[in-house]
Image: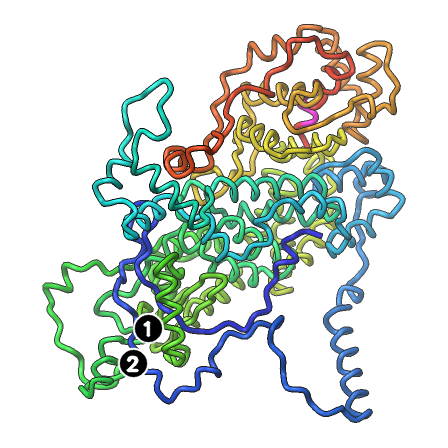
Amino acid sequence: MDRGLGRRRCRVLPLFAKLERKESGGQGFHPLTTPPWNLPSEGIDTMTHRTVHPSRHRPTRSPLLAPATIATAAFALVTLWVLLGASSLLADPLAMPWRAAGLSEREAAAHLLDRLAFGARPGEVDRVVEQGLEAWVEQQLAAALPEPVLEGKLRRLKTLEMSPRQIADTYPNPGLVLRQAARAGVIDREGLQRGTQPGPPQENPPQDRNPERRKVMEWARQQGYRPQREVLQELAAWKVLSARYAENQLRQVMADFWSNHFYISRADNEVRSFLLSYERDAVRPHILGAFSTLLAATARHPAMLLYLDNARSTASEAAQKTFDRERFERRQRGGRGGFRGRGAEPPRDPERERRRSTGLNENYARELLELHTLGVEGGYTQEDVVAVARAFTGWTVIPPGEGRQRVEGMLRRNPQATRLGFVADLDGLFLFRADAHDAGPKTVLGRSFPEGRGIEDGQDVLGLVARHPSTATHLARKLAVRFVSDQPPEALVQRLAATFTATDGDIPAVLRTLVQSPEFWSPTESRGQKIKSPFELILSALRATGAEVLDPRGVIQALERLGQPLWGYQAPTGYPDRADFWVNTGALLGRMNFGLALATGRLPGVRLDVTALLEGREPESAEEALAACLPLLLPERDPEPTLRRLRPLVRDPRLAEKVDAKAPALEEPSPMTDPAMEAMLFPGLEPESRGDAGWRLAEKEPTALAQVVGVILGSPEFQRR
């Protein structure tokens, strides 16, 4: 089973906390450095506000229930199951119009595997036909197939079992580690500066040329810190192995779609430690559920709050706050003033207020409207962006290190923070600061939000935009582009949008409408109209050939060389899903190089026996091998055009050499983390491999069968799905 399913949380969380300054990546983390409250705890029953974990909570035993009570409870449970758990059984059976599109059942099965999976494995078309196309689609929508093979592959990825807090504590930002070491007296500030200054280039620089570096390294090891690269590599390995081995393939396709929709780049050094938990806890548990739930989960995750700068967004100095700390403290001292506007306003210095920044950051608000929900043409205004940004002030992240310890200490001493509007998830590291939230009235997309509220401002904005008609159209178009064509028919988009609206954003319902639409099956509007991204190309090649991924790092490097480093795109739009972004002469030659490298056993960490494709039979000629392998790797497609195109290539014994010579120089894979910083903290760490080993072909001549398989995998026809 996908590990994402196993990470769903059912905790009752304490709803209070504060945020102090977080130092990360060389920049101040939060403009609010003053403790958010100083609350008395005398006379408060702290037990009523403690964190409750279901695994540890033991309710008081109740007396035995009467038989009538048991019967009533059983009837209620059955009724609830019928209404909720068995609701899918009441849905109309699928009626997919593949016959009306002129397809055979095998052709329709192959098309489903091209779109709802990362391609067919050997013999899988036959298995889908035997099961029944409708039954297979329903099974994929349910996403409940056991995953013994995948679970075995993932067992060695230890970070999948760690909480967000554990990951953040174990894989901190290197800049934060250096500053913590300075505060701990391990190095002084001048030593810290010297340690981060680049020295003159040396052919073989000694690891210990700076004694401050040795001190920091030893201290970091004592703290149990590990390089961030480890968690990023395990995240990438999880994605690759899941797409290759999962039985619930539609779940993996939708995970890729929604991860790219709610995109976060690893280029931001503050979010690297949170990327894995973001995928596992915010994205994957909700990819086949309600869109509103998925949207809410991404909105409050630390990775999103940091990436789009909402963690720094605070109400202006003059704005009404949900919790006014200054007034509260005056009241505690016996002075005038109080909570939420009670009492006289304190005197203010207009010149001081003019010099101070308001603290409002619009980045998340803008991307929420433009990318995540309504779309560029969704009908919102700049005033809406500002109002949404105000609604999300105070949504931030619990700081790391000593700052978190201070927060937890405040929680123990001040259990009444919940009543004052503070909200915290100590494991997930989300924090709502009532003292940083703009509690003034707002108007978003024509809807009024009254004054004096707190976290519910942002929550209600999420509900509003999730159910907006422009959101339905925007998401329907993106799904149609992903599953049908770069320019999907408008009738299909409107049909999907209508289902989205009618079902309150139920993602499986939209997908059911998709596969029952004639446009999905059309030979002119869908079949073969989509160009595979490098991720789709590589995973479909691994699945089509039955290649075993023993070590995912070779696959991850191949993705980088083909231009799609995982989470490496800079813009928050995510990778474009259109052919013109991926296809050019150099890219096609690079893809042919990949196909030949995979087929000839030159992709590190991947084992492929090409003779197994033909069950050990060795063809007598390259043409015979081409005719035998083509229907296996491109099932249920017209072979004649491809045979004519590929015959001259498979006859050329110097093909690999020619392709390699004509291919443009490939960019070096970008490092996942800051190599200079990691070299300072972990000087014995093996550098990330960025050489050509395993990408270019071996000097020995490949077998004719291997070259044929490589040519098919690199052919224009294999690029289409």
Residue 448 visible at all: no
- Cβ atoms at labels 2 and 1 below 8 Å apart: yes
Residue at 31%, 67% (x, y): give it: 436
Residue 603 relative to residue 168: left or right: right
Identified by mark 2, the residue type is: Arg
Q: Secondary structure at mark 1?
A: loop
Task: Give the vertical position of 694 relative to 234 (above or below).
Answer: above
Q: Is residue 550 left or right of residue 232?
A: right
Image quadrant in which you'd find residue 412: bottom left
Q: List x then y, in percent, for residue 184.
A: 30, 52
Q: Return the x and y of residue 196 as percentages of the image width and height.
A: 29, 36
Residue range corresponding to the magenta coloring: 714-718
For residue 407, which quarter of the picture?
bottom left
Q: Tag 2, which secondary structure? A: loop
Residue of label 1 = 439
Mark closer to the observer (2, 1): 2
Toward the viewer: 94 or 345? 345
Residue plotted at (40% across, 44% down): 269
Dot label at residue 340: 2
Q: In x, y percent, where is residue 473?
A: 55, 54
Q: Tag 1: residue type?
A: Ala
Residue 663 at x, y = what percent?
Answer: 55, 15
